[in-house]
């Protein structure tokens, strides 16, 4: 896998917008503000490919990055975020809809912050 040839592919806010999977996918999951986007940037040796923020809840879409032979999916975080309950429900539908699709998911990387006990959502 060549990490030098990578591009932002698309962002989707509704599961119905996501096209069928045509590449194997590696999914990054975790709580809001745990560092999913930062990890993607670090792995790909980029500073700002995946949007990073100090404020929880900034990733409100599933963001896809294309590496020619594999696709990375950066999921919205769960848990604490200063957003409305309806927005949290939209995120839940988006993520649940994504996982319910017939996608070629090869790996899910679940990121946890060891400074805090695991929550029910982490499990």
Image: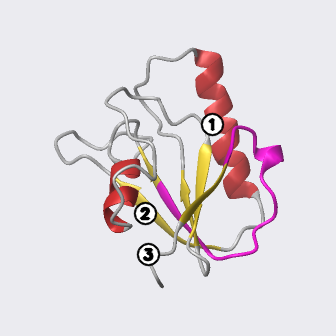
Which residue is at 48% across, 85% downward? Answer: 1
* Residue 119 in sight in this render: yes
Q: Are there few (<14), some (14-19), or many (20+) residues within 10 Å of tag 2? A: few
Q: Position of residue 99 (x, y in %)?
A: 67, 56
User: Is 107 on the left-hand or right-hand side of 71?
Assistant: left
Foreground label between 2 and 3: 3
Residue located at (61% from left, 81% from top): 69
Labels 1, 3: front one: 3
Q: How far, Cα to Cα, is label 2 from label 3?
A: 21 Å
Is residue 123 visible from the viewing direction of this image? no
Judge the density around disc 1: few (<14), some (14-19), many (≥20) Cα neighbours within 10 Å.
some
Q: Quadrant of residue 66?
A: bottom right
Magenta-drawn segment: 11-28
Of labels 2 and 3, earlier in sequence is 3
Q: Which residue position holds label 1?
A: 92
Q: Is residue 118 above or below residue 32?
A: below
Q: Residue at x 32, y 43 (%)?
A: 34
| Mark 2 element type | strand
Q: Point out residue 21 in the picture as x, y percentages from the top left corner.
A: 75, 68
Q: Residue furthest bottom?
A: 1
Q: Which mark, residue 4?
A: 3
Residue underneath mark 2: 109
Task: Identify the mark at residue 53; answer none if there is no mark.
Answer: none
Residue 15, magenta (yes or no): yes
Q: Earlier in the sequence, mark 2 or mark 1?
A: 1
């Amino acid at each position: 896998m060549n990490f030098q040839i990578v591009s932002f592919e698309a962002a989707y806010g509704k599961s119905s917008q996501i096209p069928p999977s045509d590449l194997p996918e590696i999914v990054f999951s975790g709580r809001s503000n745990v560092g999913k986007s930062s990890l993607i940037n670090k792995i790909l040796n980029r500073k700002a490919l995946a949007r990073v923020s100090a404020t929880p809840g900034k990733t409100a879409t599933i963001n896809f990055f294309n590496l020619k032979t594999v696709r990375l999916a950066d999921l919205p975080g769960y848990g604490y975020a200063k957003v409305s309950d309806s927005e949290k429900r939209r995120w839940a539908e988006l993520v649940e809809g994504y996982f319910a699709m017939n996608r070629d998911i090869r790996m899910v990387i679940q990121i946890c912050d060891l400074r805090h006990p695991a929550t029910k959502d982490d499990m």
